[in-house]
Amino acid sequence: MKPAVLARKVGQALLAPLIAVVVAVLVTSVVVVVAGASVSEFWDVMTQPPSSRNMVNIVNQSSMIFLAALAAAIGFRMNLFNIGIEGQYTLASFTAAVVAGMAWFPGKLNILVAVVVAMVVGALWAGIAGVLKVTRGVSEVISTIMLNAIAGTLVGYLLSNHGQQYGQGRRTTPIPESSQLAGWTPFAEKDGAIWTLVLLAVLAGVGISFLINRTRFGFDLRATGMNEPAAVASGVNVKRMVVISMLLSGAIAGLIWMPALFGGADYYGPPFQRTLGFTGIAVALLGRNRPLGIFFGAVLFAWLNEQANPLALVADISPSVVQITQGVVVLAVVIAYEVVRRWAAAAEQRALRKALDEQPTAEGVAA
Amino acid sequence: MSSVMSVTAARREEAAQKRTRMYYLIGLVALVSVALVRVLTGAHEIDSQGSLRAAIVATCPILLAALGGLWSERSGVVNIGLEGQILLGTWGAAFFTYYYGPYIGLLGAVLFGMAGGLIHALATVTFGVDHIVSGVALNVIALGLTTFLAEAFFADLDSKFGHGGAQQLTGLQKPFTITIPGVSDFTSDLAAKHWFLVSDVAAFIAAVTTSVSIVTVVVFVLVAVTGWVLWRTRFGLRLRSCGENPYAAESLGVNVRFYKYVAVLISGGLAGLGGGYLALVSSPGFHTNQANGRGYIGLAAMIFGNWRPGGVLLGSGMFGYTDSLRLRDPATIHAMLLLVGAWLIAFAAYKLWRRQTRSGIVLGVFGLFFLVWFLTTDEVPVDLTSMTPYLVTLLVLAFASQRLRMPAADGQVYRKGSVG
């Protein structure tokens, strides 16, 4: 009986993502057909094995998406909707780039300081929303949206007034050469390097999953998310938890762009990758806010983005089509989970009913 | 018993009258202070006909999104997907306007927005998915879909009905505009004289009587219709009851799912019309990601407005006005500092008078900050101006949010017959 139950549980857990992927594939195919392009060509491009260069890019991009999703997940686990990851990592990345560019410290120490600065700035920016929520009852959804806009404008202002002129735009002072990390080149030199600070994503993933699953803080956090009144009754200080979770979420958000900064971006300027914060939210939802699930989600999103690049050239299809796939996957997976959950609950009730009918003596106990 | 009832009713009536008088008073004070600041600083653009016109045009899409949010949240469904529904509306408007003219285009915008609403309703009402999750996913899908469809359908269009590109479709036909001949000229002349108070009122009248798009008129009618339907009809009462306590509504025989579906569809339609407004009235055509965060701003305006049509109008107006300020000259923006500073200090004084010392002091400090900023500088960097509405919203929420009350069951997943 035991292995059968286990098999059913695993089956149920995998069923939902499977349904979601099938639905996403179908919807995307329909959209491609509507646009008058060839479906077979589209999937040919999307499913061809990635080149060495693509692999490197997928790893690098996954690390940033993973960090963004992790930041979102910390909030989501206790029903906090930190929509402000976008603003937090924008402001944190800019500040860290400025600090690193100043080169107050030599070599590697400079990196450490900049990373810490990024975490602190991200945490503080998120903390504003946390404090406003617990002291003034302001919904974090709205305050973080406002803080996103403020961070964006602030960084734009600072960059255009104090940045260094570079080509058409402006940038922060590039970081000194001694602080640039070469990374790891698994393939040929021309295929690019995997950024050294991709390790940050690994560390953060392990650290956060330990924190959430193995510590008292993590237990309190999950308890508050699942049943706040119960958590309060058992002595959890919810206000304190809200502020700490926001700080933590913001600190992780601050890390998002660090791999890129020290892995070759060298400065904050126009090529800065935006909207990672929103991608992170989608991936966190896709991965059910669990580090392992988020990992797979991040790789899937990075893979879709990377594979879509040649679409315009080869199949005359806009690469933005993968955004549809990504959105549909997120929506389909949550719907599928809900459907599977309802179906499993109904099946369980039926089984129980059957068992009770076969054992009339148990009736008294059941009643 | 009945006499007690009538006494309470009379008291309530009296309170309502007092409130109305207070709103008039606040409105008058605002008007006078604007006029005063304008005359003192000589920044006539602060409420010139052109500025007000730009503000109204900037307000409408935000207002439509906020109204959409109001419908949806009053039925208990949080609609963060407004952004996506606006985006769908922009594409629908562009496509149908190119082939069938601007009026079918607006209809197309509404229908596309409703399609977005239908997805949201399916996910949240039928499948019981978390509302924020569904909304976020919808936004991702809509951005991808409109970008993709624009490239697929608009790239090769080029005729007298519009000029396409991979990411845009410009030169679309616009809906007609209304000018009230005599009033428009007379008030425009009066506004140009820069008289204290008279010109301010004249500028406002001129702005609303000179080449106003028919869609703008429709938008403001929709605000009134929304207020009437939601608060003065049986249908509205039932819809709101679904947002306050769906299980109680269910026990009274209200078909909760039906009302939620209707509300979310209307919500999507309104947001879609907002998209249509952006593509056909605000700007010369469609371009990708045209919503540019207006869905989120609409949501904020709705919360700012305490989930009520009047408040929604006020909140959207504030965002619209500051949004339009970006296009004005730096001197006007500089004059705004004085206005904001003065208002904050007045608000602080009111708080102190009400013995709310702490918030009074904080507000006063902010007010002084703006005044000092005004006195020590000559102009404001334009980048910082666009920050103002967000900062003001944060401040207002921080100091007023205890008085805000959202529908009691807002954002909760409802499942028929499962009341615990």
Image (spheres, grey):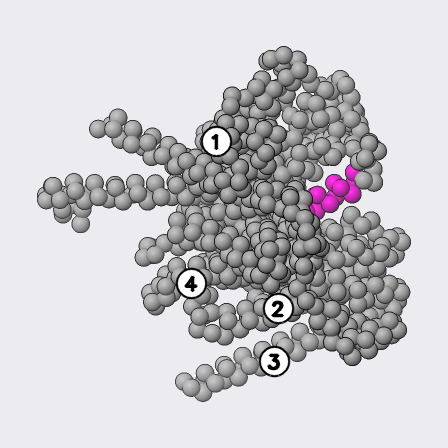
Q: CA distance from mark 3 to mark 4?
A: 33 Å
Instruction: Inspect this view and state whether residue A229 appears.
Output: no
* Letter of the chain that mark 4 sits on in the rendering: B
Residue A7 location (% of width, % of height): 29, 28
Q: Which residue is mark 3?
A: B17
Report crowding for label 2: few under 14, some 14 to 19, many 20 or more residues within 10 A (C-alpha).
few
Q: Which residue is mark 2?
A: B218
Give the residues in magenta: A147-159
Q: Nearer the viewer, mark 1 or mark 3?
A: 1
Q: Nearer the viewer, mark 4 or mark 1?
A: 1
Q: Which residue is mark 4?
A: B259
Residue A168 location (% of width, % of height): 81, 35
Q: Residue at x 47, y 61 (%)?
A: B263
Instruction: Inspect this view and state whether residue A272 appears.
Output: yes
Q: CA distance from mark 4 to mark 1?
A: 42 Å
Q: The residue under label 2 is which amino acid type?
A: Val
Are the residues tagged 3 and 2 within 8 Å (C-beta)? no
Q: The residue under label 4 is which amino acid type?
A: Tyr
Q: The residue under label 3 is which amino acid type?
A: Gln
